[in-house]
């Protein structure tokens, strides 16, 4: 029998709320917008729910539902196998990822002011270096979360932000992605929008650099996050447990953050 | 060094180990069968969208469908009629602090190996406490039976005969004691049902569902790797999907354990 002192301290800190738990997850409902691709491509299902019984003749004592969606519906995680660049990597699907990585520190870069002015805003290497000069170096194995306050766009049209030229949502520039992968060895990149790449990321070189370079390096993605404005720039621990879907390319999931409260 | 920083470092250096208590979700995973007059929970099914092909040249992804109670899953109080009036009784409204909680593991694998209808009693729990100490308030009680090792044989995992399923579970008295005397967080099992397979015949049918959810407590089903956990000291991370008004959810259950 072991009774670990650190885990005991954790349990106690959770109980006394000196460590707070923050939910970074959007509610999964049929109203949540789903990524939409050109019609010639395969489409992700939106979230649908169907009642099995609700304390009625179909099940007098029970309430429960069946549901359907895609591996990339709602707040979700992208595994390396989601992209062709990650297809041959070991442990590249949600069932084989190292579970130790599913709890990792996060750095939160606040781009909310820039994204408010420019929906096509691209996170740059300069932004990252400016963040580091204030908050210290991004540690290897940490999530880089891009705060844009995009999650506050409660209307689905404004959230998706399409016009005749395509989607206009913020994301990282190619150089920033390369820097995070090669110079900082991050665990992955997380975003409040429906793609880890900018809406216009198809026009970057390579197209969709965050998908292409991150997954090609075995790194992860998180999309449709919320409440990033409640996180400190550094010091949060992020819990990202995807469903254990056999050979799954990704998964909707509950993302929680642990933060130490100021005393 | 503050606790959170120390935790982060210990996870990174693996002095805290993360253990996966989740069964793989696949079309082969057995699902619960109810009598035909009732609504049925779906097994896991999936439909490929693309795999680096003409439907999506650079990407691989799938659509899927299942029940809120398919695979390793979480039961919220609203799953049962006794929990319907509780506030915050669905997976989207339960306070998130409840998803990171200490656990004790009660090992009855030897008993269950000899009797698939074996029942966990208050006396067995009191004997466990004599060896491991009192079950702390707000802790998960995880019932280790090694039933998860049957998962590759659906017939043995469900263990259904003409008279119903034969799987282990707690007695009504044990559940009443865990709720009233120990104020546990919930009850977790390796089988597909927090209740014993034959409990539908009891004077109070399905006591674990009825009483636990009636007390606003939670359930975890189809767990695995409980044999890798210490009897006390693990912290369980069990956060369901945030399904609007969801009665439960498949989820990834992880345990944190400290190397001594």
Image (tube, rainbow, N blue to C red):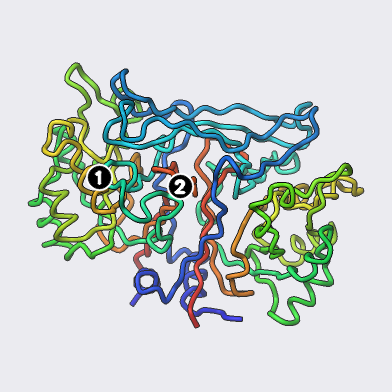
Q: Chain of mark 2?
A: A
**Quick one: SS at disc 1?**
helix
- The disc placed on residue A254 is 2
CA–CA distance between discs 2 and 1?
26 Å
In the rendered image, residue A175, in percent from the top left (x then y), is placed at 10, 48
Question: Residue at (39%, 47%) from the top-left corner?
Answer: A24
Q: Nearer the viewer, mark 2 or mark 1?
A: 1
First in residue order: circle 2 vs circle 1: 1
In this view, which residue lies farthest toward the left?
A: A126
Are the residues flagged by discs 2 and 1 from a single subunit? yes
Of helix, strand and loop, which one carries label 2? loop
**Mark carried by residue A85:** 1
Residue A19: name its quadrant: bottom left
The residue closer to the viewer here, A159 or B229, is: B229
Q: Is residue B208 left or right of residue B18?
A: right
The residue lying toward the viewer, choosing from A263 and B142, is B142
Q: Is residue B100 left or right of residue A141?
A: right
Q: Residue at x 23, y 65 (%)?
A: A139
Vertical side of A78 occupied by B234: above or below: below
**Residue in the foreground of this view, choosing between B21 and B181:** B21
Q: What is the chain identity of the residue bearing mark 1? A: A
Give percent across and percent down for residue A195: 28, 37
Vertical order, B19 against A243 (above or below):
below
Q: Is residue B245 visible?
A: no
């Amino acid at each position: 029998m072991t009774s670990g002192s650190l885990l005991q301290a954790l349990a106690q800190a959770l109980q006394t709320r000196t460590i707070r738990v923050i939910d970074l997850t959007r509610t999964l409902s049929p109203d949540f917008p789903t990524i939409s691709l050109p019609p010639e491509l395969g489409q992700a299902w939106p979230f649908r729910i169907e009642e099995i019984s609700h304390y009625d003749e179909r099940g007098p004592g029970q309430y429960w539902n069946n549901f359907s969606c895609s591996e990339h519906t709602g707040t979700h995680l992208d595994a390396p196998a989601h992209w062709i660049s990650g297809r041959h990597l070991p442990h590249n699907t949600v069932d084989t990822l190292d579970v130790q990585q599913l709890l990792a520190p996060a750095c939160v870069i606040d781009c909310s002011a820039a994204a408010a002015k420019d929906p096509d805003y691209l996170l740059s290497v300069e932004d990252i270096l400016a963040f580091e000069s204030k908050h210290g170096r991004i540690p290897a194995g940490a999530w880089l979360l891009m705060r844009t306050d995009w999650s506050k766009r409660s209307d689905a049209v404004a959230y998706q932000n399409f016009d005749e030229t395509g989607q206009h949502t913020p994301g990282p520039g190619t150089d920033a992605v390369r820097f995070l992968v090669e110079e900082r060895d991050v665990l992955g990149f997380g975003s409040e929008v429906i793609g880890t790449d900018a809406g216009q990321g198809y026009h970057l070189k390579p197209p969709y650099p965050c998908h292409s370079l991150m997954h090609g390096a075995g790194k992860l993605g998180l999309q449709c996050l919320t409440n990033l404005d409640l996180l400190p720039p550094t010091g949060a621990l992020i819990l990202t447990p995807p469903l254990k879907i056999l050979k799954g390319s990704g998964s909707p999931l509950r993302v929680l953050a642990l933060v130490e409260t100021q005393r | 060094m503050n606790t959170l920083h120390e935790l982060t470092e210990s996870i990174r250096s693996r002095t805290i180990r993360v253990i996966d208590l989740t069964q793989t979700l696949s079309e082969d995973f057995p699902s619960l069968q109810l009598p035909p007059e009732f609504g049925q929970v779906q097994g896991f099914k999936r439909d490929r969208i693309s795999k680096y092909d003409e439907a999506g040249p650079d990407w691989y992804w799938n659509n899927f469908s299942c029940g809120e109670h398919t695979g390793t899953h979480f039961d919220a109080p609203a799953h049962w009629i006794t929990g319907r009036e509780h506030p915050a009784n669905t997976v989207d409204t339960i306070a998130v602090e409840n998803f990171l909680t200490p656990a004790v593991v009660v090992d009855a694998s030897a008993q269950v190996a000899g009797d698939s209808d074996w029942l966990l009693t208050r006396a067995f729990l009191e004997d466990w406490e004599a060896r491991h100490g009192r079950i702390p308030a707000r802790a998960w009680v995880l019932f280790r039976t090694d039933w998860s090792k049957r998962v590759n044989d659906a017939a043995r995992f469900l263990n259904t005969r003409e008279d119903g399923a034969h799987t282990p579970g707690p007695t009504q008295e044990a559940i009443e004691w865990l709720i009233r005397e120990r104020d546990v967080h919930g009850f977790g099992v390796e089988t597909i049902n927090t209740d014993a397979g034959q409990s539908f015949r009891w004077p109070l049918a399905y006591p674990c569902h009825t009483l636990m959810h009636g007390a606003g407590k939670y359930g975890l089903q189809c767990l695995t790797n409980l044999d890798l956990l210490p009897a006390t000291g693990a912290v369980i991370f069990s956060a369901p999907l945030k399904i609007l008004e969801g009665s439960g959810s498949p989820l990834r259950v992880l345990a944190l354990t400290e190397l001594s």
